[in-house]
Image (cartoon, coloured by chain):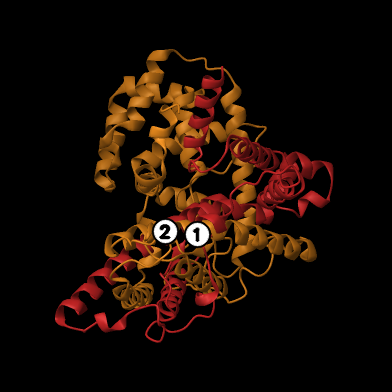
Amino acid sequence: MQIASDFILRFLMSICFIQDKTNTTQILWIIFMAVVGMMAIEFTPWLRRKSRIFKLIPGALLAILCSSFIEYCIVRPLGSKTPLVQDKSHLNQDGVIPLPFFLNKQFDMTKLKMDKNDWLRILHQGYMLAAIGTVESMLTMKIVDANTGTLGWGNRQEFAVGFANVVAGFLGGMGGTAMIGLSTIVRDSNDVFVNVYNDV
Amino acid sequence: MNSSNNNESDDKAPTAVSAAVGDLEEALLSQPSSPSPTPLSNTHTPPLSQPLYSNSYSHKQQYLEEDESISESLSTPATTTDHSLHLYSENVSSPLILSSDTESQQTIENEKNSNSFLSKALAAAAASPVDEATLAQVQDDHLLQVPTKKKGLHVGTLLDGWTPYDPKADKTSFYVRECLNGLAISFTQIPESIFFSKLAHVSPALGLRSSWIVGLICALIGGRPAMINGSSGAYAMMISTFVIPPLDSNGNGQDIEYLFPSVIFAGILNMIFSFLNIGDGLLTLLSTTIVIAFCNCLAIFMANPLFNYEFPVRKAFVIH
């Protein structure tokens, strides 16, 4: 019986991409918090019909509040603790203030000799990044258009992404474009969808 | 909306697929109970003189009504034989009809008139609801449709995303809801950015920094409200091919110095693309199948390093 339960727990742990530093109780708490978060997102339309306060609160924020309430009011007093982001990757205050990348002392800028090979490599990488950034931002824009039923301006978004990448590369970031997952989370915020929820 | 505009655009639709589907939809939507019997059209062009958001809002409402009418027609039982249904579905999915020339359309119409069996089957299928598979396909395509308004370089004004879609909506509740959404997004963006920076073999500070810079600038001057920008998965996947993975798990990889000039060059290329009308051109070219394929491939490529490094599949099958 113990072997079977241990096997099931290990299997659930491998599904949830949890590393094996965690205990059995931690895994159970994590699964419980995930289930509570999913239920909170699932039942927000029902809650919106019941009271007016929940029309303001998005479902994702409700899930985060529920899981952090469980963490700090139930799990911590009972003596256990679920892993945080801090345990996975340690952040210090060195990189808080953004500096231009050639003034930052983390990077060894003497590697860049600006030969023909270096220029070719930079142009090659930049061309590939620009192509994939364009495609991803336009695809995400199409998904958001289909979700909200409204229109966006592709060229303006393209210009904004380019300007943001220039600034981010100058200040020592890795650049970026639109994020598909978070864009589908935030579709709650539109009036169109809130009206749909109220009608249903 | 004005139904005359819709009818004109539907008449101009060149493909015979839209014509065949249009017959079906007209037959479906011409019920006496349905409030707006306008046909569904791919090419919807709202007039540019009116404000865009009010237009699109009413358009969305019209879409919802049409959906309800379609679902009502779905619930009614089918009365035709299976033979004609099979013929109809073959006719919809045949690759011949995808040609966009007017001559081929005319030939297909002639074939329709000459071939009495096919025309009978089409009429029978149009008179009564067809099987659920084709109707569900039609409904899915219709749900994923987006109204297209692309005439030149229309950019809009700066304050487009800062007001609610519905002009009658309460503004205080709108702003409170937007702020709470921003809070939720900021909570979820931190672990995602750290994961993407680990995927790209750079330190987490770079991912967080680029996430706030890109998000802030795209929220201020971007062209799509309700879209989140930040350090994204496709960029991380592409950067992971440039940068050699580090020995320290929180450090930067080798050859990271080549990354920043290339990101600046990518931004300059993106700004050039925007003036060459490539953004809107890609929006009209990309189909929904490409969207689905891109999302699935991105998910597989993002799950791959997890399977290699952190996925404890062996530990799951070894019991102490």
Q: Residue B198 bears which disc, if any?
A: 2
Left or right of B29? Residue B101 is left
Which element carries disc 1, helix, strand or loop?
Answer: loop
Disc 1 residue type? Ser
Q: Residue at x 58, y 60 (%)?
A: B226
Q: Residue at x 45, y 23 (%)?
A: B125
Which element carries disc 2, helix, strand or loop?
Answer: helix
In this structure image, what is the colour of chain A? red
Q: How many marks?
A: 2
Q: Identify the chain drawn in orange.
A: B
Q: What's the CA distance linking mark 1 and mark 2?
A: 9 Å
Residue marked by disc 1: A89
The residue nearer to you, when weighing B255 against A130, is: B255
Q: Residue at x 51, y 39 (%)?
A: A16
Q: Residue at x 47, y 22 (%)?
A: B131
Q: Chain of mark 1?
A: A
Question: Do labels 1 and 2 touch, CB within 8 Å?
Answer: yes
Quarter of the image with the C terminus of chain A in it: top right
Nearer the viewer's eye, disc 1 or disc 2?
1
Question: Based on the displayed image, in which of its 4 quarters is residue A56 positioned?
Answer: bottom right
Disc 2 residue type? Lys
- Residue B237 can be seen in this image: yes
Left or right of B57? Residue B144 is left
Measuring from the top left, give residue B303's x and y in whole percent.
39, 45
Return the residue found at the far left: A116
